[in-house]
């Protein structure tokens, strides 16, 4: 795969690096220090909360006063059980940078990457595999949707957060972007100095970019997002409030289209069995904040 426009390649300490020119020296110095050692030796809270299931993150001061978030690229689900966190080649590093840049240029609200790097996963047989890392440019003041919804917000602010998140997902889908792991931790919401809220998508691993998405892939993404709420959000506000949040999100996602929210709710109802088995699995494994949940709401 060719490099995205505006990126260059370099090598340092056995790492293959793809970087924006502004982070050329920064990324090479990081390779010399070994990102794995930095992540392992970082602060105890480098992995922030339940949505950080794919590993630790470390915030580092960038070259121009901004903050760089370093993370190791990790597999999810069953693949991780068999392959761990190693990859066959550098495709994973290059593809996330390429996808991020392509999505950004098409108007998808994604956080920008500063660089990606990979190195042999070890010696012997592991030498033919790679471990990979990415550095993204932090959106200052941003909170994940998980963080926003886990605190007691005034009703108007909660509504603004949900609408900003829904508009970000809709914009991505309209431009042909399907997130590979859409969950409450991969949507950021930022409040500007003017009091306006904006949504952004992060962690683009395994995402896809194509033509404007049809109903079914949109629904799959939204059901995945709903499952993460079922799994992680504390069940303290009651079924009625929870249902209002879902309907409000879907109405914002469909931009107020007549019957739009209802269509997605009815589509989501087809996934009740899947959600039931996920809940069962969470209870067995002790994952998430699984308590008694309400059924999928209906519009009024």
Image (cartoon, helix red, strand yellow):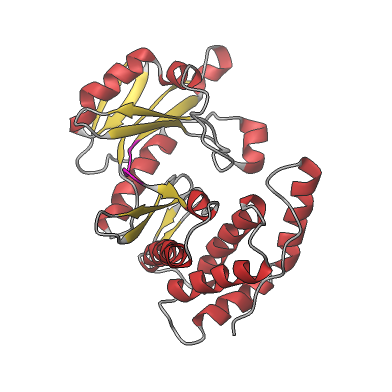
What type of secondary structure mainly makes up the magenta span? loop
* Residue 184 image point, x, y percent: 52, 52
In the picture, measured across the screen, residue 154 lies left or right of residue 276, that is left
Q: Residue at x 50, y 73 (%)?
A: 248
**Residue at (24% x, 59% y) in the render:** 194
Image x and y of residue 224, in percent: 59, 58
Q: Nearer the viewer, residue 190 or 217?
A: 190
Residue drawn at point x = 25 percent, y = 54 percent: 193
* Magenta-drawn stretch contains 140: yes
Q: Give whichever of 214, 230 is nearer the camera.
A: 230
Residue 201, relative to residue 286: is it above or below?
A: below
- Residue 26 vertical position relative to residue 67 in the rendered view, above or below: above
In this view, the residue farthest toward the bottom is: 258
Q: How many marks?
A: 0
Question: Which quadrant of the structure image shows residue 136?
Answer: top left
Chain part drawn in magenta: 136-141
Residue 278 in the image: state x and y as whole percent: 73, 54
Is residue 254 positioned above or below 27 on the image? Answer: below
Say whether residue 115 is visible: no
Tell me what residue is drawn at x 46 percent, y 22 percent: 39
Relative to 262, say whether 182 is above or below: above
In magenta segment, residue 259 = no
- Quarter holding the C terminus is bottom right
| Residue 247 visible | yes
Which image quarter holds the N terminus? top left
């Amino acid at each position: 795969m060719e490099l995205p426009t505006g990126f260059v390649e370099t090598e340092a300490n056995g790492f293959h690096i793809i970087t924006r020119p502004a982070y050329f020296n920064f990324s090479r110095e990081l390779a010399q220090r070994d990102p794995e050692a930095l992540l392992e030796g970082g602060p105890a809270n480098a992995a922030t909360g339940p949505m950080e299931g794919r590993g630790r993150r470390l915030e580092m001061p960038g070259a121009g006063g901004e903050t760089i978030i370093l993370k190791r690229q990790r597999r999810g689900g069953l693949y991780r059980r068999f392959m761990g966190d190693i990859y066959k080649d550098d495709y994973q590093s290059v593809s996330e940078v390429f996808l991020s840049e392509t999505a950004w240029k098409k108007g998808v609200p994604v956080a920008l990457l500063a660089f990606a790097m990979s190195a042999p996963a070890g010696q012997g047989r592991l030498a033919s595999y790679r471990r990979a890392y990415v550095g993204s440019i932090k959106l200052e003041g941003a909170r994940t949707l998980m963080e926003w919804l886990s605190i007691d917000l005034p009703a108007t602010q909660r509504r603004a957060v949900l609408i900003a998140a829904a508009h970000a997902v809709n914009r991505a889908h309209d431009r042909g972007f399907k997130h590979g792991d859409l969950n409450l931790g991969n949507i950021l919401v930022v409040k500007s100095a003017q009091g306006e809220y904006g949504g952004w998508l992060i962690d683009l691993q395994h995402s896809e970019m194509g033509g404007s998405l049809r109903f079914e892939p949109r629904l799959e993404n939204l059901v995945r997002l709903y499952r993460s709420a079922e799994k992680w959000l504390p069940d303290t506000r009651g079924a009625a409030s929870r249902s209002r949040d879902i309907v409000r999100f879907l109405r914002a996602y469909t931009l107020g289209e007549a019957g739009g929210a209802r269509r997605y709710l009815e589509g989501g109802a087809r996934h009740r069995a899947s959600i039931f088995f996920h809940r069962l699995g969470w209870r067995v494994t002790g994952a998430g904040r699984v308590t008694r949940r309400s059924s999928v709401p209906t519009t009024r």
